[in-house]
Amino acid sequence: MISVLHVDAFASAPFTGNPAAVCLLRDERSAAWMEAVGREMNLPATAFVTPRPDGFALRWFTATSELELCGHGTLASAHALWETGALAASDPARFHTKGGVLTATRRDGWIEMDFPAVPEEEAPPPADLLEGLGVKPLYVGRSSLDYLVEVENEEAVRALHPDFRRLATLPVRGFIVTSRSHSGNEDFVSRFFCPARGIDEDAVTGSAHCCLATFWSRRLEKHTFSARQLSTRSGALKVTLAGDRVRLAGQAITVSRGDLLV
């Protein structure tokens, strides 16, 4: 039997933030098996954690594909290791992933992760991008993973109703739409869409903030931010740009536990 936890990541209360399944493996399993479990779980991410002498191997799958980088799946995995006692509460979690070595530590009631920065550069928007999002952008950039689109204000971010079929035709992972926050509680807000990966709108996307950190550092001339992703479930993050790394902090809550029997 394989222990499986359903965790809400970047969440301060149950049924908020971004849900992930975390499978705590004893031994390596095949990619085909992981893909099948990801389809069965049908969550924004299913994380597979396998012990290694120097930490843990970590892979993430959606219901349709493997992910290169996944913030909420990493946060959920670290939380699961500490909660089950697979890792001592005082020890940092060290993960070997397709996105490089990622670490997580517990700090003042939050889990802080160390991720690579994923900077964007200004890029001409393809027609399907602007028509698919239905926005008039202030700025369009592209990173190695996603397009980033800045819009006028928070209301414009909230009002988005994208054409997901059109967006899914573009050869990128996803689309970050962002603006400054007008609530006074956060520095910036965002939403994230990745229909080509089987998720029309992701609830809270840690990896997108690896790009947002570099973008808003230039705009706001600072390195530490409070951020909120404005999905239906919503979620808060603390974001710090440190050279070519980004520290992402969030909270997590276990919603259920069970066993995988196959």
Image (cartoon, grey):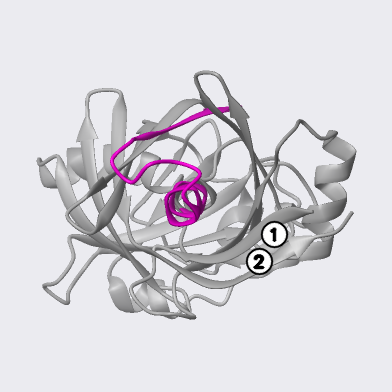
Q: Nearer the viewer, residue 90 or 150?
A: 90
Which amino acid type corresponds to the residue marked 2 in the rendered image?
Asp
**Callout 2 touching callout 1 (CB < 8 Å):** yes
Q: Is residue 237 left or right of residue 165?
A: left
Residue at the disc numbered 1? 195
Tell me the element at label 1. helix
Quarter assignment of residue 30: top right
Percent coordinates x, y for residue 74 in the rendering: 49, 45
Residue at left offset 13%, top offset 47%: 220
- Say above or below: 132 vs 225: below
Quarter assignment of residue 109: bottom left
85 within the magenta span: yes
10 Å crowding of disc 2: few (<14), some (14-19), many (20+): some
The disc label shown at residue 200, or none: 2
The disc label shown at residue 36, or none: none
Tell me the element at label 2. strand
The region drawn magenta spans 76-99
10 Å crowding of disc 1: few (<14), some (14-19), many (20+): many
